[in-house]
Image (spheres, grey):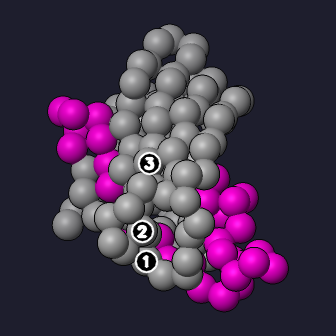
Amino acid sequence: MSSIFDDFPTPSSAKLLGWEVKAIDIAAKTIEIGFTADERFLNPAGTVQGGFLAAMLDDTQGPALYAASEGQVYAPTIDFHVVCLKPARPGRFTARGRVVSLGKTIAVTEAELYDEAGILIARGTFTGRVMEGAMARRDTA
């Protein structure tokens, strides 16, 4: 699948999480991202530590906005709220993100994280400061 992320260097944090674009729907302002968590992500109870789940959600909602705006804007997170609903075991995860609202200075996005069985593990709501994206800078250069 070809996407706006083909020419975008994958950050090392996303590589650690096994970040992989599965689907983008620009019209619906949604994205689907795959992740993989192995033993490096576990807490003492043997489940994926909540900070990694939050990182997966964050690495879904941001790309949702970037893709939906076709690279015109991105929004560094200024506030987020994550709810961990079920223990997460190591394995493959799918996250679905969407743009809720995009204003001139503030964006609101959401993401949900599912395990391999399709069970909702965690969800998050994010607020970000809207910034000019790489494609916007390229268009004016």
Q: Is residue 118 magenta?
A: no
Would residue 68 be seen by someone viewing this image from the given angle? yes
Residue found at the far right of this picture: 44
Q: What is the number of callouts on the image?
A: 3
Locate the C terminus by quadrant. Answer: top left
Q: Pinpoint residue 15: horizontal percent, then vertical percent.
A: 56, 74
Disc 3 marks a residue whose amino acid type is Glu
Q: Which disc, if any, is residue 68? A: none
Residue 131 vs residue 97, the one in the foreground: 97
Q: Which residues are magenta?
A: 25-54
For label 3, the residue is 112
Which residue matches tag 2? 115
Q: Quadrant of the N terminus?
A: bottom left
> Where 126 falls versus 1 (above or below)?
above
Q: Secondary structure at mark 3?
A: strand
Q: Is residue 113 left or right of residue 82?
A: left
Mark 1, other Cα within 10 Å: few <14 / some 14–19 / many ≥20:
some
* Residue 14 vs residue 95, the one in the foreground: 95
> How far apart are the two marked residues, 1 and 3, measured between alpha carbons?
14 Å
Query: Which residue is the site of mark 1?
Result: 92
Assess whether mark 2 and mark 3 are in contact (beta carbons under 8 angstroms): no
Mark 3: give few (<14), some (14-19) or many (20+) Cα within 10 Å.
many
For marks 1 and 3, the one nearer the N-term is 1
